[in-house]
Image (cartoon, helix red, strand yellow):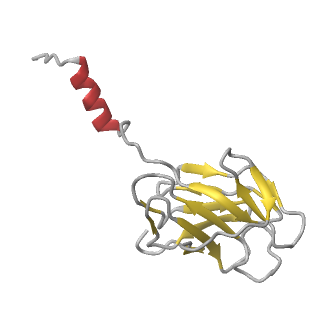
Amino acid sequence: MTVRRISVAAAAVALVALTGMGKTSVAPRIVAVELQPEDPSPGGEFIVVTNPGTAALDLGCWRVASSTGMLVVAPPLRLAPGAVTLLSARTSWLRQTDRVRLLDTKRRLRVATPTLTDPAADDRVWFREADGSWHLARKSFGKGVITGHLVTRASSRC
């Protein structure tokens, strides 16, 4: 048997290539949650997700979990760097007090909110501030928000 010696630098390069440790992908960020809309019709509950990274991110087939279960982001949903999407479902999927988790296509947790409570059916929405804290407030999302859909079953593309 022949033993081959390689440098520490070559071993490190091989380790990064095999494990993906060198990837610089940034997880998407949940920046807003509407738990209890003033309009109780389906679709009023939503989350807003942004891509803070420098590369495009495909959220299609990702999962969104809450205390009521798990929904799937309908593909395709490609977010450019800095882009924002508002995800909603045609059914009620959030409770008055809830925690939202975003899982990638391999069902790995990528981001989660703390447990949030919306005490009144009004037009206030939970917003994540730049420092990471959450506040219940009235704010607008501005122009350019991409509409995304949450569905109960994954499509054949997932």
The picture places residue 71, in percent across and down from the top left corner, at 61, 68
Left or right of 66 in this view: 28: left
Left or right of 90 in this view: 109: left
Above or below 107: residue 119: below
Residue depicted at 73% across the width and 49% down the height: 114
Above or below 4: residue 36: below
Residue depicted at 73% across the width and 47% down the height: 133
Above or below 96: residue 13: above
The picture places residue 110, in percent across and down from the top left corner, at 55, 50
Which residue occupies the extreme left position in the image?
Answer: 2
Which of the 4 quarters of the picture holds residue 41?
bottom right
Which residue occupies the extreme right position in the image?
Answer: 119
**Front position in the image: 79 or 156:** 79
Left or right of 140 in this view: 157: left
The picture places residue 148, in percent across and down from the top left corner, at 55, 74
Residue depicted at 25% across the width and 24% down the height: 11
Marks counted in the figure total 0
Residue depicted at 62% across the width and 57% down the height: 30
The picture places residue 39, in percent across and down from the top left corner, at 80, 81
Q: Quadrant of the N terminus?
A: top left
Q: Quadrant of the C terminus?
A: bottom left
Which residue occupies the extreme front position in the image?
Answer: 142
